[in-house]
Image (cartoon, rainbow, N blue to C red):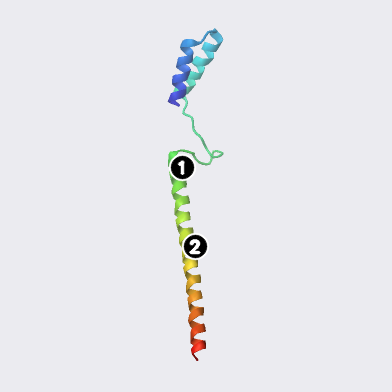
Amino acid sequence: MKKTGNIVHDLLNCAIGKEIKAELKKFSFQLLHRKIQFTANGYFMLDNTFLHSLIGTVVTYLVIFMQFQMGSSHSSIRQQCNYTERDLKQEVE
């Protein structure tokens, strides 16, 4: 936002035509007095707070998902070990 204002003011100093200068002044005025906000169809604001919450939620779900994956791989190893123990007991008898 600040960069855009700086560029507009630089262009105002270089503007050749009166129409261009008038449009740049209007645009500069709008930049100063209107706060640009992004929303999701008017339901909620898309700002830094929302992005931080979204990233935190995604990371949390990924960690939980990875823990479930690790847990299921450990249980399959345990099952394989159990089968081996059963087979050994049967061979001994």
| 28, above or below 74, in the image | above
Q: In the depicted view, which residue is nearer to us: 88 or 56?
A: 88
The numbered mark, 1 or 2, whose residue comes first in the sequence reads 1
| 65, above or below 75, in the image | above
Say which residue label 1 marks.
51
Rendered location of residue 42, percent (x, y): 54, 38
Q: Residue visible at 46% across and 47% down?
A: 55
Tell which tag, 1 or 2, sits nearer the viewer: 2
CA neighbours of label 2 inside 10 A, class few (<14), some (14 to 19), many (20+): few
- Tell me the kind of residue under disc 2: Gln
CA neighbours of label 1 inside 10 A, class few (<14), some (14 to 19), many (20+): few
Residues at circles 1 and 2 in contact by the CB criterion of under 8 Å: no
Q: Residue visible at 50% across and 79% down?
A: 84
Of all residues, the one furthest to the front in this rendering is: 91
Q: Secondary structure at mark 1?
A: helix
Residue 33's image quarter? Answer: top left
Image quadrant in which the N terminus is located = top left
Q: Secondary structure at mark 2?
A: helix
Rendered location of residue 30, percent (x, y): 49, 21
Relative to 15, 49 lies left or right = left
- Tell me the kind of residue under disc 1: Leu
Say which residue label 2 marks.
69
